[in-house]
Image (cartoon, grey):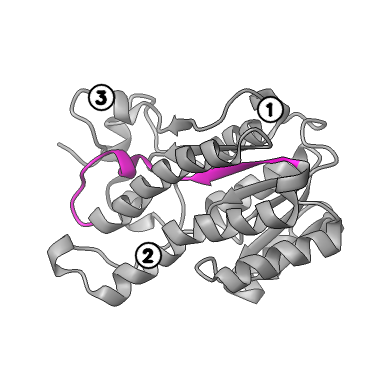
Amino acid sequence: MSSPERLAGRVILVTGASRGIGLAVARRCAEEGARVVITGRHEEGLNQARDAFPDPSRVLAVVAHAGSWEDAARVAARTLDHFGSLDGLVNNAATNPYFGPLVEADEARMRKAYEVNQAGVVAATAAAWRGWMRDHGGAVVNIASIGGMSVEPGIGWYNATKAAVLHLTRQLAYELAPRVRVNAVAPGLIRTEFARALWEPAEGVLSQRIPLGRIGEPADVAGAVAMLLSDDAAWITGSTLTIDGGTTSRPSGGVGEP
């Protein structure tokens, strides 16, 4: 259950928030009293997401590329101009343009994943820091993945970028303390369009391999992110919260193993 007053008066920016985990996080923050900025690549989908909020006037939608440093600075500036502060940042945007062995990956798709999943985290955090958080404080939550903690076939490069996010979380927590807290969540398999190719073909089998008996929903992640943005996490920084239904507690490890 959400806490309506927990994020009251705060402005939260969520990247990649036109659907999936990002949209669920943005909605949860709004339910808990925040004004919200959502970003995405496609204007139509982004505007549809904004208009579905109970009060769209408290939501600013900004078209932006999460791998662009220029866009990161522009989004931060738009946020401050529109709402007057930037108290929380959720680095959610991610891409996975390549599936296959690392040694067969091409430079263009590897670079794209790096720019969005890894460098984009630094770009957005730096823009929020320079624009507001350096002087006023704030909280950053990075959306990583349990893939960054394990070895899996086909998505090795994506997982490598998420492993980098785990380290960036600790590094930024150290560098930005004490004014800014930086934490991460590492979701397991979540029912999103982004992960559809992983869960849809064998959801029943996969669910049986998860100790809590089901794959995750975006809302499962959203509540944890809202907590980390709030004062309930006032003495938490540099940490990663695993949200995987117990997947990584299994002796054999990953969801995809027999």
Residue at the location (30% across, 68% down)? 110
User: Is residue 30 left or right of 163 when viewed as pictured?
Assistant: right
Q: Which residues are magenta?
A: 137-154
Give the residue number, with chain letter if any, for mark 2. 113
Residue 106 rendering spot, x and y as whole percentages: 22, 74
Tally of marks: 3
Which badge, 1 or 2, comes first in the chain's sequence?
1
The quarter of the rendered structure image containing the N terminus is top right
Q: Amino acid at mark 3?
A: Arg
The quadrant where residue 112 appears: bottom left
Residue at the location (68% across, 41% down)? 28
161 up-or-down from 221: above or below: below
Q: Nearer the viewer, mark 3 or mark 2?
A: 2
| Mark pair 1, 3: CA separation | 28 Å
The quarter of the rendered structure image containing the C terminus is top left
Residue 58 rendering spot, x and y as whole percentages: 84, 55
Q: Which mark is residue 250?
A: 3
Residue 253 rendering spot, x and y as whole percentages: 22, 31
Is there a contact, CB below 8 Å, between mark 3 and mark 2? no
Give the residue number, with chain letter if any, for mark 1. 1
Which badge, 3 or 2, comes first in the chain's sequence?
2
User: What SS does tag 1 mark?
Assistant: loop
Q: Amino acid at mark 2?
A: Ala
Q: Is residue 176 magenta?
A: no
Residue at the location (81% across, 52% down)? 85
